[in-house]
Image: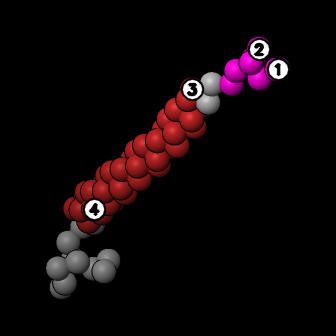
Amino acid sequence: MIADMFPMDMTGLSHSVTTGRIDRVEDSVRRGELLRASQEFESYFLSYLMKVMRETVPKGEFTANPMG
């Protein structure tokens, strides 16, 4: 009798649970893409930084690069 007075509609609950799972998967994918992009940027930045730093080391008289 109570069930007739307060019917439970589970479709909204199921939809919100499914949507929540999809959102978590999408967030995980976005984080993975962001991580990969940040690692690529870090690699590029460090390569460029090392190149510029090497250009500041003076050339030696007897060797092409006395510092290393």
Of labels 3 and 2, earlier in sequence is 2
Bin the neighbour count of mark 4 within 10 Å (Cα to Cα): few under 14, some 14-19, many 20 and up. Answer: few
Residue visible at 40% across and 49% down? 29
Image quarter hosting the C terminus:
bottom left
Question: Disc 2 designates what residue?
Answer: 5
Mark 1 in CB contact with mark 3 (< 8 angstroms): no
Amino acid on which the number 1 mark rests in the picture? Ile
Of labels 1 and 4, earlier in sequence is 1
Residues 46 and 18: in front is 18
**Is residue 12 depicted above or below 40 in this figure?**
above
Query: Magenta part of the protein: which range?
Result: 1-8
Question: Disc 1 designates what residue?
Answer: 2
Residue visible at 68% across and 24% down? 8
Question: Residue 12: which disc?
Answer: 3
Furthest-right residue in this view:
2
Question: Disc 4 designates what residue?
Answer: 47
